Amino acid sequence: MPQDPTGRHWVELSHVISAGMTTYPGLPVPEITPHLTRESSRDVYAPGTEFAIDRLTMVGNTGTYLDSPFHRYPDGADLAGLPLERLADLPAVVVRTAGGGARAVGVDALAGLEVAGRAVLLHTGGDAHWGTPQYAVDAPFLSGAGAQWLVEHGAALVGIDAINIDDMVPAGERPAHTLLLAAGIPIVEHLTGLANLPLTGARFTAAPPRVAAFGTFPVRAYASVPASGG
């Protein structure tokens, strides 16, 4: 892990976005095309100076992304209205259920944790299947009761390293989204690399651009970890 002069390590928690990749089956894939090529820019700028300007077409649910309350509720905070204290430099608590065999992260996995004002990151191991059809099959998720517990105990943000924070099997039912976003708690889905974080001690950031009237957008999710590992 890279280390800065303060002794912190930086941990990447986002998937790379590339043209044609599938994040969520059935949604359009991103398209990356040139708007201004380096070659054509030579006719615009001084000799020896060139730039590339590219165009990215994608839905907000691409790569590792954040859901704002507006994603679920028309009167909820959109990306431009999210307070930075919900997105940046949050103390993190990792809920490690990877390898446990259970799909649902429930109250039993959360009880006893200090989550108030923290980013609660669900390390389920679901990211092991990223980019394959298996990623969407029997994926881990947060139970409705678990989401309610996190609301009641004041979580600032909740993230998961799986395809959806809700169970995709019951068609149309999304209790975790419904409860968390109603409480103003942003959700980050499709995280990766949570195995590299300590259970406590890391600081988590996942900030989208300030887009008005927009509910979901990719983020560069990352964490800093003290040299001691927390």
Image (spheres, rainbow, N blue to C red):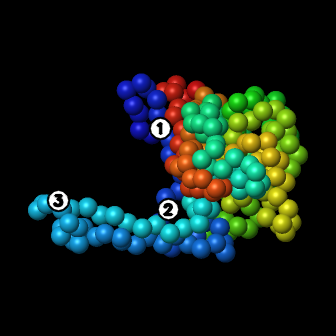
> Which comes sooner in the sequence, label 2 or label 1?
1
Task: Assess disc 2: are there few (<14), some (14-19) or many (≥20) residues with their C-alpha within 10 Å of its C-alpha.
Answer: some
> Which comes sooner in the sequence, label 1 or label 3?
1
Instruction: Report whether residue 165 is seen.
Output: no
Q: Dot 3 corresponds to which residue? A: 49
Residue 137: x %, y % from top left: 73, 68
Which image quadrant: the N terminus?
Answer: top left
- Under mark 1, the amino acid is Trp
Check contact, mark 2 vs mark 1: CB within 8 A: no
Instruction: Tell me the mark number nearer the camera, choosing from 2 and 1.
Output: 2
Quarter of the view holding residue 147: top right
69 sits left or right of 219 in the view: right
Task: Assess disc 1: are there few (<14), some (14-19) or many (≥20) residues with their C-alpha within 10 Å of its C-alpha.
Answer: many
Label 1: which secondary element: strand
Check contact, mark 2 vs mark 3: CB within 8 A: no
Which image quadrant: the C terminus?
Answer: top right
Closest to the observer, 196 or 183? 183
- Under mark 2, the amino acid is Ile
Task: Look at the picture and state if 223 lies above or below 57.
Answer: above
Label 2: which secondary element: loop
Closest to the observer, 11 or 219? 219
28 sits left or right of 109 in the view: left
Q: Dot 2 corresponds to which residue? A: 17
Task: Assess disc 3: are there few (<14), some (14-19) or many (≥20) residues with their C-alpha within 10 Å of its C-alpha.
Answer: few
> Which comes sooner in the sequence, label 2 or label 3?
2
88 sits left or right of 93 in the view: left
Instruction: Tell me the mark number nearer the camera, choosing from 1 and 3.
Output: 3
Say the numbered circle drawn on residue 10: 1
Label 3: which secondary element: loop
Q: CA distance from mark 2 to mark 3?
A: 28 Å
- Under mark 3, the amino acid is Thr
Task: Look at the picture and state if 151 lies above or below 62.
Answer: above
